[in-house]
Image (spheres, rainbow, N blue to C red):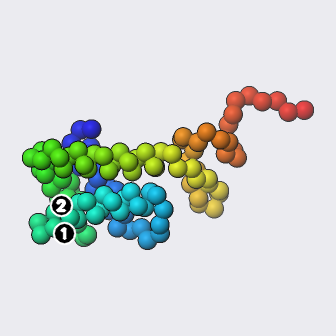
């Protein structure tokens, strides 16, 4: 994964995790990234309340100089994305979103080709 993309995604995930208060696999994966970044930049940069561009620049700098950091962060980001891509949620007109990207089953409202009912 390109470093700039990796850094941007890690920042977005960490900031998202700061705002979440509920549990679950996706929140846990986001919290893992937040924890990883918090420990790495402890004493150097405050993650909570930091400007996203400043955090992104710090991640880029760190990843360029430390390949282990880059590999560990990439593993965590990939894990988060894998969980995100396999999650299934459904939407209603009241504001809930639909995401059925990797669903092997059927979601109500999902188009399943041309079917004729008589």
Counting from the top left corner in percent of width and height, residue 65 is at 9, 47
Q: Tell me the element at label 1.
A: loop
Residue underneath mark 2: 40
Label 2: how many Cα within 10 Å (few below 14, some 14–19, many 20+): some
Q: Is residue 71 left or right of residue 100?
A: left
Provide residue 12's location: percent of width, then percent of height: 32, 56
Image quarter of residue 48? bottom left
**Vertical arrangement, residue 16 with respect to residue 67, above or below:** below
Q: Is residue 70 left or right of residue 30?
A: left
| Residue highlighted by disc 1 | 46
Q: Position of residue 24 (x, y in %)?
A: 48, 62
Query: What residue is shown at x 59% (from left), y 59% (from top)?
Result: 96
Q: Is residue 7 visible?
A: yes
Give the camera-side residue of 63 and 7.
63
Measure how far apart labels 2 and 1 are at the Cα level.
10 Å
N-terminal of the two: label 2 or label 1? Answer: 2
| Residue 51 at least partly seen | no
Classify 10 Å Cα crowding around label 1: few (below 14), some (14-19), many (20 and above): few
Image position, residue 86 (x, y; %): 51, 45
Quadrant in which the N terminus appears: top left
At a point 67% along the width and 45% down the height, the residue shown is 107
Mark 2 or 1: the one toward you: 2
Residue beneath the point at 59% across and 60% down: 95
Viewport quadrant of the C terminus: top right
């Amino acid at each position: 994964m390109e470093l700039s993309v990796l850094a941007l995604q890690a920042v977005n995930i960490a900031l998202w995790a700061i705002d979440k208060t509920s549990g679950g696999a996706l929140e846990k994966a986001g919290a893992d990234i937040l924890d990883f970044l918090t420990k790495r930049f402890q004493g150097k940069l405050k993650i909570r309340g930091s400007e996203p561009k400043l955090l992104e620049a710090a991640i880029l700098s760190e990843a360029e100089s430390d390949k282990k950091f880059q590999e560990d962060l990439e593993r965590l980001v990939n894990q988060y994305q894998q969980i995100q891509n396999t999650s299934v949620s459904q939407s209603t007109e009241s504001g809930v979103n639909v995401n059925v990207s990797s669903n092997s089953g059927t979601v109500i409202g999902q188009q399943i080709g041309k079917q004729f009912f008589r």
